[in-house]
Amino acid sequence: MLKSFTFDTFKLRSATKQIFGTHQHYCALNDNQSHGQSVEVRKALEGWDEKLKEAGVGDIEFNLKCLVAHVLKRKFSTLKSYKTEKFTAQQHSEFSRLCEARCARMPLQHILGEWDFMDLTLKTAPTVFIPRPETEEFVSKVIEEYRSVKQPIDMLEVGCGSGAISLAILNALPQVTSTAIERSKVATTLAWENAKFLKLSDRFTPYNHTTSKNNYLPKELANRKFDLIVSNPPYVRTEEFPLLQPEVTLYENLNALDGGSDGLQIARLVFDLACLHLRPGGKLWLELGSEHPPLVKTIMNLQYEGRLRFISGYIDQYKRDRFVEIEKV
């Protein structure tokens, strides 16, 4: 049973009051300005780099450019010399509000309400886990493994969150259909909305289901076998939670990260699920913590011999052992 984590509601309320109180202040200021008055982005940026630095936000230039692009309703890549752009008074007020939210360490992805993943733009929502850049590497490896496969591929994703992994694979590989399970109702709904928005819903079926021992899949899927299973399960060790960034501890669903005492609590359920629902020769791909691939290899050899076979571990862009490939015997 996963330990239940909750947000620091006092901090969150304080941050929210700060954000919206400041927003009202800026709105009041702008009410006294003429509606036609514009502000050069360079001027609007003044002071925010210092405030963000004091708040502990990293990569400040990137954060500010993302917020400017969002307010101007422009693609990030199209804003070259963005400081010479101009805000209307209303846009200036909106930019200031968003900067205050970032100073309160609200994740940039939640502020924007969307985030690019691979070649897709996905809607985001508070408490739904935001995929990290390394997950794009993980998905790329899976795509390359199956790019030359011509026959249909029936895939299962365990813990789909916003749908990022499944939808990126579906977008790249037309021969794949994906079934996904997700314990969060909010995330399940968001994944379905993203699939419809990206016109991939005809090959994507999400289920709201909590995987547990001897209850791995919904009843509708009890007899299904899959060619491929992918998962980015919770892998943070419980003792590591105090070390997480405020963006995570204040604004994300920590249950989506908690992997138990060794970080493999949910992964072990996925191993058992694969034994029952993966076709012989089918593959299980997992994104895990950097200390896990060697441990998973040992677990396969000692506990799953004759059922699952460890194929390989793969490093991410930071040279950390992160991804594993396992085959159903």
Image: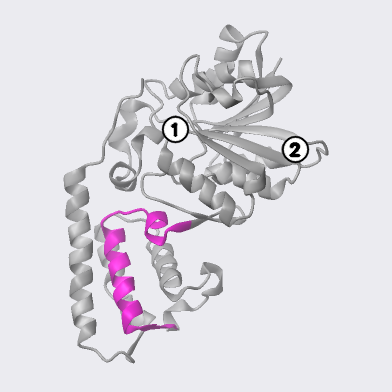
From this viewpoint, is residue 132 visible? no
User: In the picture, which quadrant includes the N terminus?
Assistant: top left
**Distance of label 1 from label 2 (alpha carbons):** 27 Å
Q: Nearer the viewer, mark 1 or mark 2?
A: 1
Scheme of colours in the image: one colour
- At x 54% / y 44%, what residue is drawn? 163
Name the residue furthest front.
220
Q: Is 32 displayed left or right of 131 in the figure?
A: left
Q: Does residue 71 appear to the left or right of 308 in the view shown?
A: left
Residue 50, horizontal then vertical, whole percent: 27, 66
Q: Amino acid at mark 1?
A: Arg
| Residue 183 numbered tag | 1
- Decide whether residue 105 is among the magenta residues: yes
Does 199 appear in magenta? no
Q: Position of residue 37 (x, y in %)?
A: 32, 91
Residue at 47% x, 58% y is: 114
Instruction: Tell me which numbered mark, 1 or 2, is placed earlier along the sequence.
Output: 2
Tell me whether circle 1 and circle 2 mark residues in contact (CB < 8 Å).
no
Would you say residue 160 is visible in this rendering? yes
Viewer-nearest residue: 224 or 317: 224
The three-letter code of the residue at mark 2 reads Tyr
Position of 231 relative to 115 (above/below)? above
| Tag 2 secondary structure | helix
**Residue extent of the magenta highlight:** 85-114
Q: Residues within 10 Å of mark 2 (few under 14, many from 20)?
A: some
Q: Where does the C terminus fall, quadrant-wise?
A: top right
* Res 324 → quadrant: top right
Determine whether the residue tagged by mark 1 lies in a helix, strand or loop.
Answer: loop
What residue is disc 2 on?
A: 146
